[in-house]
Every structure is written in C-alpha cells, then in structure tokens.
Image: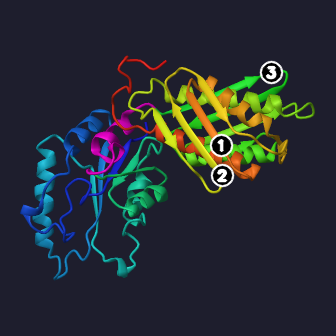
Amino acid sequence: MADKVLFLDRDGTLNLEPEDNQVDALEKVELVPGVIPALLALRDDGYQFVMVTNQDGLGTASFPRDQFDSCQSHILSLFSSQGIVFDEIFVCPHFAHDNCGCRKPKAGLLTRYLAKTQLDADASAVIGDRQTDLELAENIGVRGFLVDPDGPYEHTWDGIRAALLSRKRYAQVQRRTRETGIDVQVNLDEAAPIEISTGIGFYDHMLEQIAKHGGFSLRLRCDGDLEVDEHHTVEDTAICLGQALREALGDKKGIARYGFLLPMDESEARVSIDLSGRAAFRFKGKFSRNEVGELPTEMVAHFFQSLAESLGAALHIRVRGKNNHHMIEACFKSVGRVLRQAIRIESEELPSTKGVLS
C-alpha cells in the first residue's frame, strides 16, 4: 500500500516565525494555532509526517548549531508530547546564494527518501508558508497547501485538515443521445488540466474561460451533430457540465455558496449565483451579431439557462457593450469567477439555516 505523506515546513508552518526569521532561542518558539489538533486528525487518518526545512546559514557564526539544536529539540518535544512524531527530518543549512541542490524548492533533500518510499501522490502534500513550498510540491508531484493563520479559512490548519480529509470533489459524467456523445470530468480542487473539444472553436474558448476563471480542472469532449446545427452540442454540454459540477459539490458542506461579480473591461457583465439547489435563471443583454465564430449568439443565454437548471443554481446575468465577442467572453469569465467564489470551502458548516441545500 502506498504511503500518505505530509512534507511539512517548520518555521511559519509548525511554529510561528519570529520577526527576524530565525528561531534561535527557546522564547521564540510558539506553535502555529490549530496545528496540534490538525496533525492529530491527520495522523489518525494514516498520514506520515516528514519535516523539510531551510535553515539559512545553520552552523555558521550567524546561526550556531547549538542554538538550532536546542530549539529543534524543544519543538519536537512539544509535538511528541501530544503523540505527533516525524518519520524523517530533512534540513538544508545553506543560504540561497550558495546555490546548493538541497534548498527548497529544489527536491535534493528528498531524493533518497522518495526513491525508497512508495508515495501516494494523490493523497500526499507539501504544507508550508512560502511560495517555495508550493514549488517543492510541484517538483515532487503532490499537492501544496499554504499556511497563513491570519488568512482565509482555507489557509488555516483547520481548513487544510478539512481539505485533506474531505472526499475528493470530482465527478465524471457521460451522456449519449442520437444528437451528441459527451464525456465530462470535473475536479473542483485542481486547476489543471483544462482540455475541451466540442467542434466549435469559439465555444471551446468560452468553456475554457469558465474553468480557468473558476479555478477548477475540466476535461470535456463532445461529438455532436454539427452538420445539423450547434444547438444540441451547446445545450447538452451545458447540461453535462452542470450535472458534473453538482455531483462534484456533493453535500455542499462548507462551501461559500454565493458569488458576485461586476464590470469587466469595456463590456460590463454583472453576474450573481446561489448554489441553493433550486434552479432559477435571468439573462438581460442583446447581441448585434447572429454569430461569433461558429457560435450562434442566441445560444449564449440558452447555455447558461441549461447550466443553471442542471447545476441547481440561481444564476443572474446582465451584460452590455459594443463588441459581441467581448460581451460573450465577459459572461463566461464572470460566471467562472462567481463559481470560484461559490465553490470555495471556507468552513465545515452547511451554508443554510434549513440544514440542507437541495
């Protein structure tokens, strides 16, 4: 069985980082809020912990080894007293200008460990407080989480724990009719890949905008009866995309639920959404052209109506402008942006006083 491993930064992630960025005295050791209960829950779920930390100039006159050792021993004792043990500890002692092969975000510290470990890459993650930690995650092929105890919920230890322990927000939908054959895969917690092919170039570009600005991965392929017209392709892909999003959201526990967006560029698109489970749709806007690319402009509102009905969302769109291309793109981008807001996990509570969203 593959191992679920969390590669944990130390300063700023496990313990708060002091103003001088160097933990060289015991009085500077203070744990990040929420880290103990989060790691206990993750330990109980089968996660192993590996500490990976850059310690600039460790062993030099500016950072004597004994100062590090005393603080490191104290930090490890705090965690072990609560039942949290690190299977491995890797420390880079170099400065950035040393250009070593082990300093994060390089993966040199982990080369031997990764070679001997059967890693569950889908479940494992790097957790840290800097961009270099996210880059390390990318370099070793796992997810990355950024810790900021004063930031939004998803960057707190409580939010990270919830994200790691929650079910994967993924759905796959297939639909076969006489008019279309459609395959859709959605992952709300991954930003890539985005791969779309419907046979309508401009429409592909618009669907890409929803996924890109929505911050989720989307694979969508449609083989439709374009020799007849574009209607079935646009309508059926909207239905399938809405169904996939709805299934990926699951019970919707913890989501923000709502999203709002106002102007974009010279074309103004005002969009609001409520993932209430109850479909409602309003569209206000007029296009001066019959087509943009190979996409009939009459199908724009119909796409969003089909999406709202399949997703179970209240979706309101109002657009105005002079350039039809920009107006349509503003609609798709804006819907992506409000989806990004609404699907974001920001707590562990269901966002409804009724106790259900359906």
Marks 2 and 1 in Cβ contact (< 8 Å): yes
Task: Read off the residue under disc 2.
Answer: 267
Q: Can you see residue 193? A: no
The mark closer to the camera, 1 or 3, is 1
Q: How is the image coloured?
A: rainbow
Residue 76 spot, x, y in % from top left: 15, 53
Label 2 crowd bin: few (<14), some (14–19), many (20+), radius 10 Å: many
Going by the numbered disc 1, the residue's amino acid type is Val
The residue located at (78%, 28%) in the rendering is: 181
Q: Secondary structure at mark 2?
A: loop
Going by the numbered disc 2, the residue's amino acid type is Ser
Of mark 1 and mark 3, the one earlier in the sequence is 3
Judge whether residue 160 is colored magenta: yes
Main SS of the magenta part reads: helix
Judge whether residue 24 is colored magenta: no
Question: Which region of the structure is painted magenta?
Answer: 149-167
Between 238 and 2, which is closer to the camera in this rendering?
A: 238
Relative to 352, does residue 170 appear above or below in the rendering? below
Of mark 3 and mark 2, the one earlier in the sequence is 3
Task: Read off the residue under disc 1.
Answer: 319
The image quarter in which residue 237 lies: top right
Between 327 and 67, which is closer to the camera in this rendering?
A: 327
The residue located at (57%, 50%) in the rendering is: 263
> In the rendered image, which quarter contains the N terminus?
top left
Mark identifier at residue 177:
3
Say left or right for 67 vs 13: left
